[in-house]
Amino acid sequence: MSAEKNMATQSNRASEAAREQVRVMRPAVDVFENGESISLLANLPGVAEEGLALEVDGNQLTITGDIAIDMPGNMASLQADVRFTRYQRAFNLSGELDTEKIAATLKDGLLSVTIPKREEVLPRRIEITSG
Amino acid sequence: MFGSISQWDGDIFDHFNRLEREMADLLGYSSGPASIREVARGSYPAINLGSTDDGVEVFVFAAGINQDQLELSIQQNLLTVNGECPDRQPESSNAYIKERFAGQFKRSLSLPEDIDPESATARYTNGVLHISLKRRAEAKARKIQVN
């Protein structure tokens, strides 16, 4: 019985999540990696610093951005490529990334996130000594 | 025992509704006749266009562009936005996802006939280029007094 109840709440939550998904846009991103870090660029046009949230929960990084644009109140829409006011996208981070040292900047609606790798996994040059 | 059945039903219909809305959005059913200059969904940059009593507001969603790389022109009522979005892949890096548009772009859209091209002002803030145009004075909506 309680298992059923549990399923019902779970499905409730799933449908809430589905409804929520309809109202958010998935921003276009680039993800690059070099020896020291992973960098992520996300197009969030219309988002100012106050409207941006970066969250790390366990190994999941979630980017949420709310568009804030001053629009005249009595405006009738003639064309709307952008229909919602929220961008959201989540990524699973792998263990070698140091989530404590994530750095992010937002300029002209372009979010740039750098996630360094943990020091112990950085590439090391191994000295060869001749015996 | 069956208390949760209705819950499931509701969810399934929710999903159908959502699917239907998304299909309608994708195929553009519900949007009426298309503009002759309409482009495929997902074209870069995304543009919102709104009309007020006094004018027309255009919002071009183009993140991370150097302001000098943006060019605007108006011919009659045809507005054209030109620009370039740099490829930001650092040298000696691997790319896993590369969805962001890079390179030259150009998009034109027709504005209502009664706008005054001379009145255009444009501002680039937080990656959105906002262009405001006024209607010509003689075309503005007027209230007519009924005697």
Image: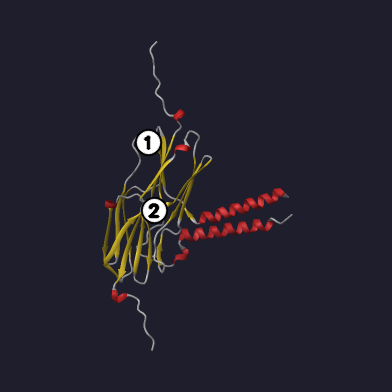
Residue, disc 2: A45
Q: Nearer the viewer, residue A48 or B88?
A: A48
User: Looking at the image, which residue is at 45% across and 62% down?
Assistant: B28
Asked if residue A68 is positioned above or below residue A115 in the image, the reply reads: below
Secondary element under disc 1, as helix, strand or loop, is loop
Color style of the picture: secondary structure
Q: Which mark is residue B9?
A: none
Instruction: Tell me if mark 1 has few (under 14), some (14-19) or many (20+) residues whose alpha carbon lies within 10 angstroms of its own.
Output: some
Q: Tell me residue B108's x, y (percent).
A: 32, 60
Q: Give the residue at the far front of this rendering.
A: A50
- Quadrant that contains the C terminus of chain A: top left
Instruction: Tell me if mark 2 has few (under 14), some (14-19) or many (20+) residues whose alpha carbon lies within 10 angstroms of its own.
Output: many
Asked if residue B137 is positioned above or below residue A77 in the image, the reply reads: below
Residue, disc 1: B93
Q: CA distance from mark 1 to mark 2?
A: 25 Å
User: Looking at the image, which residue is at 66% across and 52% down?
Assistant: A8
Chain bearing mark 1? B
Horizontal side of B81 relative to A3 (left or right) equals: left
Chain bearing mark 2? A
Residues indicated by labels 1 and 2 sit on the same polypeptide chain = no
Tell us which disc is closer to us: 1 or 2. Answer: 2
Horizontal side of B97 relative to A20 (left or right) equals: left
Q: Tell me residue B109's x, y (percent).
A: 33, 62
Residue flagged by tag 2: what amino acid is it? Pro
Q: Tell me residue A66's x, y (percent).
A: 45, 54
Secondary element under disc 2, as helix, strand or loop, is loop
User: Looking at the image, which residue is at 52% across and 60% down?
Assistant: B21
Residue flagged by tag 1: what amino acid is it? Ser
Query: Do the numbered discs 1 and 2 sit on residues whose CB atoms are within 8 Å?
Result: no
Horizontal side of B11 relative to A104 (left or right) equals: right
Q: Give the residue at the far top of this rendering.
A: A131
Q: Tell me residue A55's x, y (percent).
A: 49, 45
